[in-house]
């Protein structure tokens, strides 16, 4: 079986407390996988371990068939993510923020920016500074930034929480389109089952 993500026997301790205990996940290539965990049960910790932002105490993580290494930048360039504490340049517009993202990701198809802003419903916002955005609009911009480079793997931690019901429906359609058109594997988490069904 061809898997995109294979964490095996993952364990994580904080002080003397086990936060993650022998987690095993097998996410097949080119699927949308919902990871539903109770609040404060270590969901965000698992996401961070998959991105090498937090080290496990034991276990192994295989991504794209290779063991995850700290300095494997080529592998990490194939991954986009939305996790907690994600920031923007607040004094810039959404388009300027996405321009900068293209630069540091080495992705130079900037014509794609207007298309992505339209996909997330922000095509009319592009002259405003991000500091003027409400939380739901910032969440749409986070999603735009995450999908801009057409990643092979998209890791989303509670990515649609700040959206209204219509926004949630639109983003689900967008993720399905991304999965179908660009063959992106999507690993999405929530503590609410209905959000990932």
Image (cartoon, helix red, strand yellow):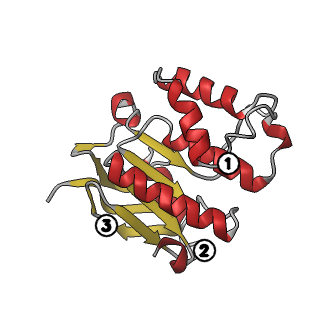
Q: Earlier in the sequence, mark 1 or mark 2?
A: 2
Q: Secondary structure at mark 3?
A: loop
Position of residue 8 in the picture relative to residue 97 (left or right): left
Question: How far apart, in angstroms, are the residues tagged by discs 2 and 3?
Answer: 19 Å
Identify the residue at horizontal 56%, vertical 74% (top origin): 191
* Horizontal and vertical percent position of residue 134: 81, 51
Density class for disc 3 (Cα within 10 Å; few <14, some 14-19, many ≥20) is: some
Residue under numbered circle 1: 85
Identify the residue at horizontal 31%, vertical 60% (top origin): 31
Residue under numbered circle 2: 39
Q: Is residue 136 visible?
A: yes
Q: Is residue 149 above or below residue 164?
A: above
Position of residue 178 in the picture relative to residue 83 (left or right): left
Q: Earlier in the sequence, mark 2 or mark 3?
A: 3
Q: Secondary structure at mark 2?
A: loop
Q: Secondary structure at mark 1?
A: loop
Q: Nearer the viewer, residue 96 or 12?
A: 96
For residue 53, the mark is: none
Q: Is residue 34 above or below residue 185?
A: below
Quadrant containing the C terminus in the rendered view: bottom left
Q: Quadrant of residue 116?
A: top right
Q: Are marks 1 and 3 in contact (CB under 8 Å)?
A: no
Q: Is residue 14 visible?
A: no
* Horizontal and vertical percent position of residue 54: 50, 48
Residue under numbered circle 3: 24
Position of residue 24 in the picture relative to residue 19 (left or right): left
Q: Earlier in the sequence, mark 1 or mark 3?
A: 3
């Amino acid at each position: 079986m061809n898997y995109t993500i294979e964490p095996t026997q993952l364990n994580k301790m904080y002080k003397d407390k086990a936060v993650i205990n022998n987690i095993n996940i097998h996410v097949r290539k080119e699927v949308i996988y919902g990871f539903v965990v109770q609040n404060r049960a270590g969901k965000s910790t698992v996401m961070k371990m998959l991105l090498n932002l937090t080290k496990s105490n034991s276990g192994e993580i295989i991504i794209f068939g290779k063991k995850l290494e700290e300095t494997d930048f080529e592998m990490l360039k194939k991954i986009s993510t939305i996790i907690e504490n994600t920031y923007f340049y607040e004094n810039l517009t959404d388009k300027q923020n996405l321009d900068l993202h293209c630069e540091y990701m080495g992705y130079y198809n900037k014509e794609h920016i207007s298309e992505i802003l339209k996909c997330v419903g922000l095509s009319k916002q592009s002259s405003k500074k991000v500091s003027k955005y409400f939380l739901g609009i910032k969440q749409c911009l986070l999603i735009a930034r995450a999908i801009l480079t057409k990643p092979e793997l998209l890791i989303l931690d509670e990515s649609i929480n700040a959206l209204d019901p219509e926004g949630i429906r639109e983003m689900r359609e967008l993720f399905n389109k991304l999965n179908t058109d660009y063959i992106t594997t999507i690993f999405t988490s929530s503590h609410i089952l209905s959000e990932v069904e």
